[in-house]
């Protein structure tokens, strides 16, 4: 309510194994079992001799009046075992160098302590900072933005009057999480959101911007770090009605591509040269404010007020639609969105996916449109991605009416090896009941994807998207990254000798979780027999090394089973099987 009122490897030859998760028991906490250190006579533990050091540069900032974002520097570099954060009687373990504390009292002085942990649960002295969320919050980011802002805090946030959702009918793609009220969460590999409010360029503001886009998000986060991305694009007519935003981008369209490693502008149809910047990687649950400013002769992107990318381009149009596209970014949260420029009236519109329902020698049927989808609408646009065996005119049919298809930029013509996007417009109401959509051509046509863009009138009524509120996920037990090589690192992976020692490295370094579950310890079995139990005293991660004597092991296949056991045994036990082969020389 407060926020709404305010805004209105280790080197060597690694052997591959498989990860197994044992599901948690949702019942009451079981009685803790004994967990005592044990090393078989064949095993030596190699401790990490690096001393845990107090974090430095602890800073508290705020993106709203009821939260604080804590960030700090790891004094021991990247080899740390995680951090323990304490505030208001609460404790959280994290792997990264930042976390966001939410649902705070806006006017209360909050003390935050951060301790570094080592792999065995040792804690450093605390770094301490204090702040009052209301006083730490700087609302100057609102300058130049039009009201109302979009708060992604409920189903009404995606009302078709203000947003179009390109998800190809995947209704479970988005849901809500109870954070500072509620926040929208992306739960699929690909979804696009497009504002129905036109971004109209105006006279330059004091900072020179003729238009701006603001987005608050913690993304991109996801399991596929190398592929995770959030795209922010400015789309003019008619490419605003494209389906999922994909390369090659339409000519002249600036697209900011945000990844865990940096930000870079891409421009459809033209090279931009070096436009990338670096910034601390995103952390799940920690929001940052992104802004695109359209200036005479350039488009500039900033994160939390610091410029990270720019594109030297003069946009030739004076109005666009802002598109947000999420790729491999499951778990990414959206919080606020705003536009700055000349105030514009929303152009309500909705997207309805179409699917191939039949083919014949002359074309492709894309199914029928229910009358209920068109009630109150002024027009409908059919958009289709097509491939043709040979060049020939394409006709789009809506019931008994037809219209020639027009190529959507970039217009590269028909090609049997490359899809082209075409569209056609039809005024409403339709003379036909539940009209059929069909695309026809003499060129041997195939349709790969298609959708309707329905321009809604003031009387149109569409149901709000069904956004289910899901509880925040449990703290994540770190998954073990396991490496097993001969101590000499000189033998091939499939030909380990029956002498010497195997160097086993277990690293708990999962940085994707908003919160890490305290780890009770690590267990290691060899061929089903327990050879090591290592208590870690509530650690958050770290690296553990073992040397396993190979003398006396029979030739053939053997298997190591590494398990990470949480303090709270209702959480998942993470297990990893690591095979290796003994071949006597």
Image (cartoon, grey):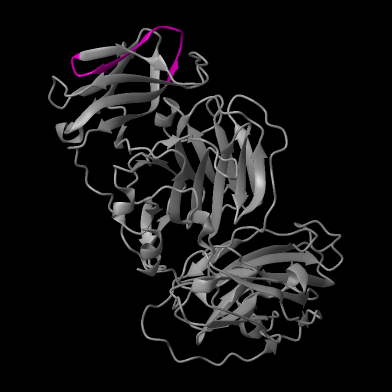
Look at 57% across and 52% down and name the residue there: 224
Whether residue 477 sits left or right of residue 480 in the image: it is left
Image: magenta residue range: 386-400
Let me know if residue 379 appears in the view.
yes
Q: Is residue 485 magenta?
A: no
Q: Nearer the viewer, residue 24 or 166?
A: 166
Whether residue 123 sits left or right of residue 515 in the image: it is right
Percent across and percent down for residue 193 are: 41, 43
229 is higher (above) or lower (below) than 578: above
Whether residue 401 sits left or right of residue 36 in the image: it is left
Q: Nearer the viewer, residue 153 or 568?
A: 153
Let me know if residue 556 appears in the view.
no
Look at 38% across and 69% down and name the residue there: 2
Whether residue 208 sits left or right of residue 427 in the image: it is right
Look at 46% across and 12% down and name the residue there: 389
Percent across and percent down for residue 21 are: 50, 68
Look at 65% across and 68% down and name the residue there: 509
Percent across and percent down for residue 172 are: 34, 51
Which image quarter: residue 404?
Answer: top left
312 is higher (above) or lower (below) than 579: above
Quadrant occupied by the C terminus = bottom right
Q: Nearer the viewer, residue 144 or 369?
A: 144
């Amino acid at each position: 309510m407060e926020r709404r009122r305010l805004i209105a490897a280790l080197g060597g030859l690694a052997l591959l194994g498989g990860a197994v998760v044992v599901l948690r028991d949702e019942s009451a906490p079981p009685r803790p079992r004994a967990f005592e250190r044990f090393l078989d006579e064949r095993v030596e533990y190699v401790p990490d001799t690096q001393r845990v050091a107090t974090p430095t540069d602890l800073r508290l900032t705020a993106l709203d009046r009821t939260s604080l974002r804590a960030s700090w520097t790891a004094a021991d570099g990247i080899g740390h075992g995680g951090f323990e954060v304490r505030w208001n009687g609460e404790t959280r373990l994290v792997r990264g160098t930042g976390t966001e504390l939410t649902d705070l009292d806006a006017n209360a002085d909050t003390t935050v302590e951060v301790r570094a942990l080592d792999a065995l649960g040792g804690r450093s002295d605390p770094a301490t900072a204090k702040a009052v969320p209301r006083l730490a919050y700087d609302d100057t980011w609102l300058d130049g933005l039009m009201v109302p802002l979009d708060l992604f805090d409920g189903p009404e946030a995606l009302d078709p009057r203000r947003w179009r959702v390109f998800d190809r009918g995947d209704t479970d793609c988005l849901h809500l999480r109870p954070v500072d009220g509620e926040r929208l969460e992306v739960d699929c590999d690909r979804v696009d959101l497009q504002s129905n409010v036109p971004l109209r360029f105006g006279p330059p503001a004091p900072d020179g911007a003729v238009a701006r886009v603001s987005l608050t998000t913690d993304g991109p986060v996801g399991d596929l770090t190398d592929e995770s991305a959030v795209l922010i694009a400015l789309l003019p007519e008619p490419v605003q009605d494209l389906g999922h935003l994909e390369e090659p981008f339409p000519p002249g369209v600036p697209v900011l591509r945000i990844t865990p490693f940096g930000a870079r502008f891409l421009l459809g149809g033209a090279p931009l040269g070096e436009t990338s910047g670096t910034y601390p990687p995103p952390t799940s649950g920690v929001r940052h404010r992104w802004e695109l400013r359209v200036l005479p002769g350039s488009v500039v992107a900033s994160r939390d007020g610091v410029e990270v990318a720019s594109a030297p381009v003069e946009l030739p149009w004076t109005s666009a639609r802002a598109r947000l596209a999420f790729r491999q970014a499951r778990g990414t949260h959206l919080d606020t969105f705003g536009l700055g420029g000349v105030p514009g009236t929303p152009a309500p519109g909705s997207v309805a996916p179409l699917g191939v329902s039949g083919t014949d020698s002359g074309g492709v049927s894309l199914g029928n449109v229910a009358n209920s989808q068109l009630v109150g609408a002024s027009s409908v646009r059919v958009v289709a991605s097509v491939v043709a065996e040979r060049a020939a005119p394409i006709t789009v049919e809506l019931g008994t009416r037809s219209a020639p298809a027009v190529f959507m930029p970039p217009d590269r013509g028909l090609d049997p090896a490359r899809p082209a996007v075409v569209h056609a417009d039809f005024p409403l109401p339709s003379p036909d009941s539940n009209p059929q959509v069909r695309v026809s051509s003499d060129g041997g046509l195939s349709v790969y994807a298609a959708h309707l863009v329905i321009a809604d009138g003031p009387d149109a009524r569409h149901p709000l998207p069904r956004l289910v509120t899901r509880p925040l996920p449990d703290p994540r037990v770190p998954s073990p990254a396991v490496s097993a090589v001969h101590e000499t690192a000189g033998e091939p992976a499939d030909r380990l000798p029956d002498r010497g020692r195997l160097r086993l490295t277990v690293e708990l370094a999962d940085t994707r979780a908003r919160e890490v579950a305290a780890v009770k310890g690590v267990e290691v079995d060899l061929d089903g027999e327990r050879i090591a139990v290592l208590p870690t005293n509530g650690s958050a991660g770290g690296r553990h090394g073992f040397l396993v004597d190979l003398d006396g092991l029979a030739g053939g296949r053997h298997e190591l089973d590494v398990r990470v056991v949480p303090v709270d045994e209702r959480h998942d036990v993470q297990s990893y099987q690591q095979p290796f082969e003994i071949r006597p020389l």
